[in-house]
Image: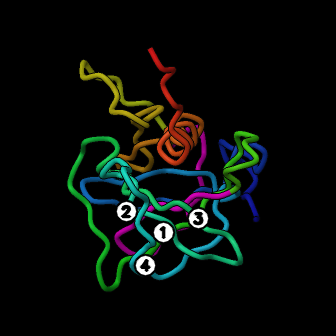
């Protein structure tokens, strides 16, 4: 990437990111966290799963859990349909049982440059929704930064519920 001399920011301050359209909003993720974009197909249902865990898709030999982030966060009811895409995300939490998970999207993610001078945290009185680390504005576009660690934990808990001890 070329930066003009006299620019207020440098390459070192810029990150590549993706804006992902979801029902009721957008997610902002680092580009490096995204493994692939695939077309939505009906996932294999997971018994007794919460409504936000849509099931599992087969991808490159993996059975990848698919989430509807808008449902998880309580933003909107989101369903996969013809034309929907799924973003496969690298799970970075170190859990051996969860190397990847997928997020239902409303189209193709948009690759963007994220620079400090164009990104601001939106302060508000409302508490952050479940699974959200921050509300931000980037180039006048509102977005949510997901809490990937929390999402990975929630997926793992949904897929592998802990048995309550017998009384």
Judged from this view, the residue extending furthest toward the front is 167
Q: Position of residue 133 (x, y in %)?
A: 48, 32
Q: Secondary structure at mark 3?
A: strand
Residues under numbered marks 3 and 4 in contact, where contact means CB atoms less than 8 Å apart: no
Mark 2 residue element: strand
- Residue most toward the top? 167
Q: Of circles 2 and 3, which is in front?
A: 3
Q: Quadrant of residue 67?
A: bottom left
Name the residue that disc number 3 marks. Answer: 64
Asked if marks 3 and 1 touch (Cβ < 8 Å), the reply is no
Q: CA distance from mark 2 to mark 3?
A: 20 Å
Query: What's the distance in space between the residues labelled 1 and 2, CA to CA?
Result: 7 Å
Boundaries of the magenta span:
100-118
Query: Do tag 4 and tag 1 residues touch (Cβ < 8 Å)?
Result: no
In primary-sequence order, the first of circles 3 and 1 is 3
Whether residue 58 is in magenta: the answer is: no
Judge whether residue 111 is colored magenta: yes
Residue identified by numbered label 1: 109
Tell me the number on the disc at residue 40: 4
Q: Residues within 10 Å of mark 4 (few under 14, many from 20)?
A: some
| Mark pair 4, 1: CA separation | 14 Å
Q: Horizontally, is 121 left or right of 127 in the view? A: right
| Residue depicted at x 49% and y 50% | 28
N-terminal of the pair, mark 2 or mark 3, is 2
Identify residue for label 2: 21
Sequence-first tag of 1 and 2: 2
Contact flag, marks 2 and 4 (Cβ < 8 Å): no
Query: Could you classify mark 1 by the number of other residues whose Cα lies within 10 Å: few (under 14), some (14-19), or many (20 or more)?
Result: many
Q: Kindly identify the residue that appears in the image at 34 percent across and 51 percent down.
A: 52
Q: Tag 4 or tag 3, which sits nearer the N-term? A: 4
Q: Nearer the viewer, mark 3 or mark 1?
A: 3
């Amino acid at each position: 990437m070329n930066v003009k001399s006299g620019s207020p920011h440098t390459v070192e301050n810029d990150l590549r990111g993706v804006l992902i359209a979801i029902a009721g909003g957008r997610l902002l993720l680092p580009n490096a966290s995204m493994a692939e974009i695939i077309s939505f197909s009906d996932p294999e249902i997971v018994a007794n799963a919460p409504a936000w865990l849509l099931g599992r898709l087969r991808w490159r030999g993996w059975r990848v859990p698919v989430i509807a982030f808008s449902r998880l966060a309580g933003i909107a009811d989101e369903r996969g349909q013809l034309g929907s895409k799924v973003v496969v995300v690298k799970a970075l939490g170190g859990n051996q049982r969860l190397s990847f998970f997928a997020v239902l999207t409303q189209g193709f993610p948009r690759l963007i440059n994220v620079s400090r001078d164009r990104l601001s945290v939106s302060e508000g009185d409302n508490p952050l929704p479940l699974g959200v680390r921050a509300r931000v504005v980037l180039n006048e576009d509102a977005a949510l930064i997901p809490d990937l660690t929390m999402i990975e934990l929630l997926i793992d808990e949904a897929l592998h519920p802990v048995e309550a001890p017998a009384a």
